[in-house]
Image (cartoon, rainbow, N blue to C red):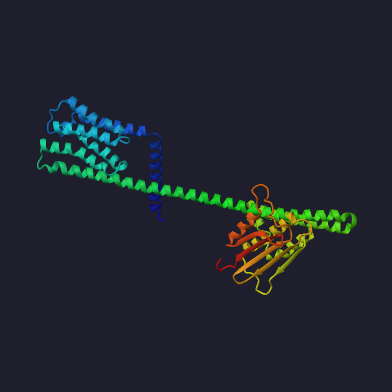
Amino acid sequence: MTTEATATTGLSRTIQRLLARARAFDARRPWLWDATVTLLWTAAALVDASGGWRNTAPDPSVPAWLVVTLSLALTLPLYRRRRQPVAVLTVMACAALVSAASGAFLQAGYLQLIPLFQIALVRPPRTLLWAFALLLPPLLTGAVRFPRGSWDQHVVPTLWAYALVALLGIAVRSRKDHTAALVDRARRLEVERDQEVRLAAAAERTRIAREMHDIIGHNLSVITGLADGGRYAAAKNPERATQALDAIGTTSREALAELRRLLGVLRDDEQEAARDPQPTLADLDTLITGVRKAGLPVRFDQDSASPAPALTPGAQLTVYRVIQEALTNTLKHAGGGARATVLLTHTPQEVRVEITDTGPATAPPPPSGQGQGLTGMRERAALYDGTLVTGPLPTGGWRVRLRLPQEGSPS
């Protein structure tokens, strides 16, 4: 960029800043600018009324008091031009009509262009018809009473001036409307972005609450089962009690590790939050082993005839959490002597999981507060176009059945 172009750009930016400051000042104190404009034109009109008007007047014998009165009537109403432009133009047009009829032909009559511009700027387009209806009588009266050559030499040029000013007002209005539309659109986009952020935050809070429920509920149930078993074994088999305590410690550390990983998403350091992977189908053996240690006999059958299910990490986490939640509910509510069975089958179209137990044929009671149990499992399934069905078995016990479609297959 040349030095001349740089200087031109800098000057343009300076002018834009000055104009922006002027508009901001006018928006804060509109009366000051209106008063300044009115006083300026009033002073100019009174100077012309002191004698200069006779240089262009067809009848220089018009009384001075009338000239002064008409000059004030053509200038003082300008103070209200922004708030009442039609009323201002009406007063000025009446004064211009008297000026034309008397032969004074005051040059202050051209100030009617100012309220005309304001009407084009802020009023509906049809209002311009009324404005031209007010402007025509003074022109025609002057042309008829004091003709100078052909009548159109007095009327047509002034009409062109009126039309150009009206078009200028319409152009400025269109640009302002376009700018306002852009600003309004930007505001709407900002509101939509804020709403998206709030919705994403709410979804993240729900996900975290669901994960915490699964982690804490399951591990505390396992720890409770281990503690009960260790208490019964302490008197007769201290070695089994020691094993139970070791298992409690291991389960507690695993629960704390999962909680640290989960709560890490609330920190700014995303790398630390994603350091430990989420559970997958490969972790099911570890999960079931922990449940067995807690005192619940679990039979785990997996269909090995078909290829391993091609599930995304999120879908695998859903399967893991549903099995975890179902076994946790069995630990809590099925009572002593209950057994559980986990059956995992998969086809090229879908993956199915069925968890059954031999406990009472009643639904587990809802957790306190807002709850994340069965509702959380259904929400997890719905995220991947799956279905979850729960209910009692005819022979007693409870069944949880999950179906997830394979990726790329119809749901």
Q: Which residue is nearer to you in this view: 106 or 357? A: 357
Q: Position of residue 183 (x, y in %)?
A: 42, 47
Check the picture and name the quadrant holding the C terminus: bottom right
Q: Percent x, y for residue 409?
A: 56, 69
Residue extending furthest bottom?
305
Q: Which residue is most to the top?
A: 65
Left or right of 82 in this view: 240: right
As drawn, is 269 to the left or to the right of 39? right
Q: Residue at position x 19%, y 24% from top?
A: 65
* Left or right of residue 257: residue 91: left
Residue 146 visible at all: no
Q: Position of residue 39 (x, y in %)?
A: 30, 30
Decide: is 285 above or below 30: below
Q: Position of residue 173 (x, y in %)?
A: 32, 45
State the quadrant of the N terminus.
bottom left
Quadrant of residue 374 in the image? bottom right
Task: Give the camera-side residue of 304 and 105.
Answer: 304
- Give the residue at the far front of this rendering: 394
Residue 355 in sight: yes
Quarter location, residue 356: bottom right
Name which residue lies at 54% across and 51% down.
197
Q: How many marks?
A: 0
Between 328 and 110, the one lying in front of the other is: 328
- Pick the front one: 406 or 78: 406
